[in-house]
Amino acid sequence: MTVHAAPRWLFTALAAALPLGCGADLPSSSSVEQLRVLAVQKDAPYARPGQEVTLRMLWTDGRPEHARGPVQVAWFSGCFNPPGDSYFGCYPQLAQLDPRDCVTGSGGARCGLGDTFTFSMTPPGGAPLILPQRSAGLTPYGLAVVFFAACGGQLGPPPPGGAFPLGCYAPSGEVVGSEGFVAGYSSVYAYEDLQNANPSPSGLLFGGVPATTSCVDAGCLSPRPEAARCGEPGVPCISACADDGDTESCPGVDVAPLLDRSIVERDSAVGEASEEQIWVSYFATRGKLSQPLKLVNDATRGWVGDYGTQLHAPREPGPLELWAVVRDNRGGVGWTHTRVIVQP
């Protein structure tokens, strides 16, 4: 197995993708015009030593249809308790793993392909996962860092001069650029007794009416039957606007996930019981969202009543995809999706 001589790929290739992996960091834009990894969900945001944790990726390919290729996702794990809890500190533990082996299937249990990946919260060599007294006032915890790559094409060896140890290629053999290749990481914390549930919405309101929602693997896109028409129950519709999403001239339609206050949990990891912070990020393939990021619950002020946004219609009729991704400050995430029909 190849041993990397320098941690160049960790320092350079992942720097631009950090918001995709961190629980508290967010993508900077609500517009989906390229391959995007919108979220990574763990079935156990707070795990226990030895527990198997399954990660699920929410991605979508917003590139023009003619530029799209099959999307391939690879994962590689094996980093536990890096210095300073930083992914930069993972290199010594990952130096013996060539991520290219994850694509060929020879990387063993530390690798995986597909939209989901299961790994064990078990450090190699019998090392303890939970380290006591990391900092005064903090509950002892452990940390695992899992890296991923999403390719709008076929994963393979890195191109000449490539910073990341994997490349992404179109069917023609051409290298796919950053518009179709995303690298990032996800952090999973472990405690002996603490738990955290994902803040999952139960649906989506569009114009104050529950919309038909669907989330499946392969990017959380489940196309509606072509027979679906505006006016049918649960089919969200909006009229096209000549100014293409302009928030002043294009009337907006209210959008909000269906959330119950029961999703709010106590955050006692810092030694003082307080409520977790929760927010929602909105994404759309077309049109414009007036406020792509809204607070749902504040750690000190509690529940926020108005966490919705408005979708302003695009110019061209046809379908658009709309997501609401709900996150908490402890690595929990949930989402909902619907297809909106833009009518002339």
Image: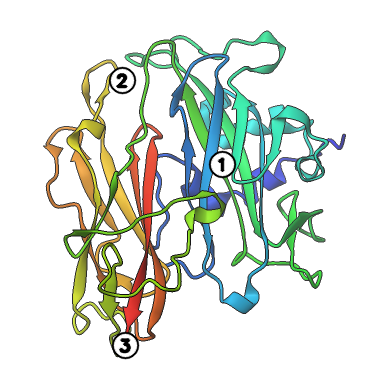
In the rendered image, the vertical position of residue 191 relative to residue 43, given as above or below:
above
Residue located beneath label 3 in the image: 344
Q: Amino acid at mark 3?
A: Pro
Q: Secondary structure at mark 2?
A: loop
Circle 2 packing at 10 Å, graded few (<14), some (14-19), many (20+), is few
Circle 1 packing at 10 Å, graded few (<14), some (14-19), many (20+), is many
Q: Is residue 57 left or right of residue 308?
A: right
**Reading the chain from its start, which is encountered first: label 2 or label 3?**
2
Estimate the x, y position of residue 207 in percent, counting from the top left.
Answer: 19, 65
* Distance from the alpha carbon under mark 2 to that under mark 1: 24 Å
Residue located beneath label 2 in the image: 270
- The residue located at (72%, 53%) in the rendering is 163
Q: Is residue 218 left or right of residue 235?
A: right
Name which quarter of the figure residue 182 lies in. Answer: bottom right
* Distance from the alpha carbon under mark 2 to that under mark 3: 53 Å
Q: What residue occupies the far right of the structure in this picture?
A: 1
| Residue 85 in view, yes or no | yes
- The residue located at (44%, 11%) in the rendering is 192
Indicate which disc residue 185 carries. 1
Quadrant in the picture for the C terminus: bottom left
Q: Secondary structure at mark 3?
A: loop
Which is more toward the observer, 37 or 93? 37
In the rendered image, the vertical position of residue 318 relative to residue 337, given as above or below:
below
Q: Amino acid at mark 1?
A: Tyr
Q: How is the image coloured?
A: rainbow
Total marks placed: 3
Estimate the x, y position of residue 256 in percent, counting from the top left.
Answer: 23, 55
Q: Amino acid at mark 2?
A: Val
Estimate the x, y position of residue 172 in percent, counting from the top left.
Answer: 80, 73
Q: Nearer the viewer, mark 2 or mark 3?
A: 3
Q: Secondary structure at mark 1?
A: strand
**Reading the chain from its start, which is encountered first: label 2 or label 1?**
1
